[in-house]
Image (cartoon, helix red, strand yellow):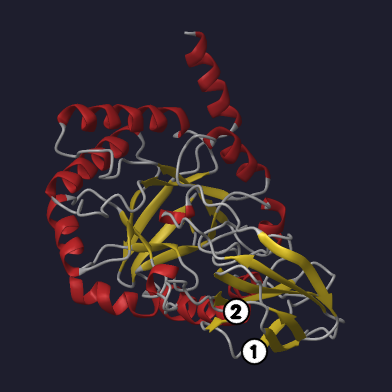
Amino acid sequence: MLSLFIASMISLQNPVIPVKINKTSEGYQLLRGGKPYQIKGVGGTGRMEDFAAAGGNSMRTWGSENASKELDACEKHGLTLMLGIWLGHKSYFDYGNPDQVKKQYESVKADVLKYRSHSALLIWGLGNEMELEGNDGPELWKAMDDLCRMVKELDPNHPTAAVVADIGPEKIKNINQYCPSLDILGINSYGGLSSLPERLKQAGWTRPYIVTEFGPAGPWESEKTAWGAAFELSSTEKAKKYKSDYVHSIQGQKGWCLGSYAFLWGYKQEETPTWFGMFLPSGERTEAVDVMSEAWGKTVSNKAPQILSSDFSRRGKTVGPGEALECTVNAKDPEGNALQYDWEIRFEASEKRYAGEGEKIPALVGDKVTTNTGQFKFKSPTEPAAYRLYLTVHDRKGAGASANWPFKVE
């Protein structure tokens, strides 16, 4: 009885704000508290004050481990949360096993009962890329449909979304056939985002969608060196992709796409320490933050530095031990700030994992070198191995730019 009383008091203090999907003659529309709500989101729950100031309104998680704190923090900053509930992947979970499926069902049910009344809750994010590894079959999507129906019965105030790794005709066919109760399709799309609306139409998807992760093309879909190191775009090249993909496949799909969550609000090690982060490991924001902030309707007062071009002739090549090398970049600061250039050589990541889970930032080789120009002359390491030359450009006012180039010593 005491727990029910406490729950009711919390509900009174933070009344539920209903979230509905409204279908009109112009298509689908997300309503929160009866008002139109276009999702201007990011993946991750750090730096909330910065995010709100940048014009964003919603954040996304992949699991519910810290949901109470994350929901409360979102509410404090005037944000909403797409609350992720992790679902089993094929490497350790069998959707053909009734006991496992039942246990997962009850776990999801417990989360829904615990958090359904929080005013910062926007959408239930059921799973993340659980269809990979050949798991995209009837058993998975029937189990997902059971979850969607249960969630809607317990919580009619918040829609359900299942999050998948991009799309294909067979995947859409299975979801349409076996999961009719799903409200929204959440799609993680990187290299393929520019063509996503066209591919969705061709595959027969008619329900609303959200782009739940997007950014630069991932390492798995990028050009690689002979030894398997993926080429990473500069922060300026990434910003251009964020912007063009957002304009076409998100903003340009009014009535179908309900919004998006850019990836990643922060930084992480995945292939490199800078591949997906909208911020640098040193804490500065990159141009990706600027272009998304402008897309969300904000004016950026101190725009990040840009890397306009680079010249490193040994990019993706093999060099000798102790060989004299040179890299030149053309960088500019839109605000006219004097720039600082930090150069580092690091080993190539030795163990690359799905989503970078457990990866450590590769060790630094020698010392970091700081210059006031975009020219760097150095000697290659003497130890035979795969390396990357990293450049971080700082405006010393909270913004920066990055680029890196793989090479190998033999």
Give the labeled residue for mark 1. Answer: 310
Give the labeled residue for mark 2. Answer: 234
Query: Residue 347, image x and y in percent?
Result: 59, 64
Q: Specify the quadrant of the image occupied by residue 264.
A: bottom right
Which residue corresponds to the image point at 56% horizontal and 33% vertical from the top-left? 68
User: For the residues marked 2 and 1, what is the alpha-carbon distance in whole angstroms?
Assistant: 9 Å
Front residue (pair 209, 318): 318
Q: Is residue 297 at all visible to an observer of this figure?
A: no
The reply to whether discs 2 and 1 touch (Cβ–Cβ < 8 Å) is yes
228 over 311 or under it: above or below: above
Name the amino acid, label 2: Ser
Query: Residue 182, image x and y in percent?
Result: 26, 50
Q: Specify the quadrant of the image occupied by residue 281.
A: bottom right
From the viewer's perspective, tell me whether residue 243 is left or right of residue 156. Answer: right
8 over 133 or under it: above or below: above
Front residue (pair 282, 205): 282
Which residue corresponds to the image point at 48% horizontal and 80% vertical from the top-left? 247
Q: Specify the quadrant of the image occupied by residue 324.
A: bottom right
SS at mark 1 in the image: strand
Which residue corresponds to the image point at 74% horizontal and 65% vertical from the top-left? 366
Q: Is residue 376 at all visible to an observer of this figure?
A: yes
From the viewer's perspective, tell me whether residue 279 is left or right of residue 255. Answer: right
Query: Residue 16, image x and y in percent?
Result: 50, 37
Query: Residue 353, image x and y in percent?
Result: 43, 54
Which residue corresponds to the image point at 47% horizontal and 37% vertical from the top-left? 64
From the viewer's perspective, tell me whether residue 299 is left or right of residue 246. Answer: right
Label 2 vs 1, first from the N-terminus = 2
